[in-house]
Image: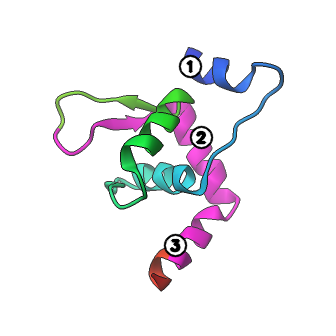
Amino acid sequence: MNAVFREHVTGIAFNLTLSKNMCAMLIEIADGNPPYHYGNFVTTWRRLEDRGLVVPRHGEKGKPFVLSEEGKLVAELVRRAGIVSHFSKAAEAA
């Protein structure tokens, strides 16, 4: 079990809040695309790491982090909620 994720979401009750950039980055990572084009890359990555959704990966060029098991589940929930479609349309319009 991911202690960082558990600690983040169960302080008082189960709560997980993600910004639009965080949702988009989760999906980009899940799809194997480098998410360097989303706002402040480092800040978003750190916020995902603080929630236990990504973990550092050392030694593999171009992929400084990967999704944790919990991150994979949350990415799937984000995708099922249809949030990804919203971001994809916004990216295409830009």
Query: How many tags in the picture?
Result: 3
Foreground residue among 94 and 80: 94
Badge 2 crowding class, 10 Å Cα cut-off, few under 14, some 14 to 19, many 20 or more, is: some
* Observer able to see residue 2: no
For the residue carrying disc 1, how many other residues have a C-alpha within 10 Å: few (<14), some (14-19), or many (20+)? few
Q: Which structural element holds mark 3? A: helix
At numbered mark 1, what does the secondary structure look like: helix, strand or loop?
helix
Q: What residue range appears in magenta?
A: 61-90
Q: Quadrant of the C terminus?
A: bottom left
Sequence order check, earlier mark of 2 and 3: 2
Tell me the tag on residue 88: 3
Query: Label 1, on which residue?
Result: 4
Q: CA distance from mark 2 to mark 3?
A: 20 Å
Residue type at the position of mark 1: Val
| Prevailing secondary structure of the magenta residues | helix
Q: Give the residue at x 44% y 42%.
A: 43
Q: Nearer the viewer, residue 40 or 78?
A: 40
Question: Disc 2 or disc 3, which is closer to the eye?
Answer: 3
Which callout, 3 or 1, points at the residue further toward the start of the chain? Answer: 1
**Colour scheme:** rainbow
Q: Relative to the observer, which residue lies in front, 12 or 2?
A: 12
What amino acid is labelled 3 in the image?
Ser
Q: Position of residue 52 (x, y in %)?
A: 53, 27
Q: At 53% from the left edge and 37% from the top edge, which residue is drawn?
A: 71
From the image, state whether disc 1 or disc 2 is nearer to you.
1
Cα distance in 3D space between marks 3 and 1: 29 Å
Quarter where residue 17 is shown: top right
- Relative depth, front residue between 43 and 85: 43
Q: Residue at x 21, y 45 (%)?
A: 62
Disc 2 designates what residue?
A: 73
Mark 1 and mark 2 lie on one chain; the one further toward the N terminus is 1
Q: Amino acid at mark 2?
A: Leu
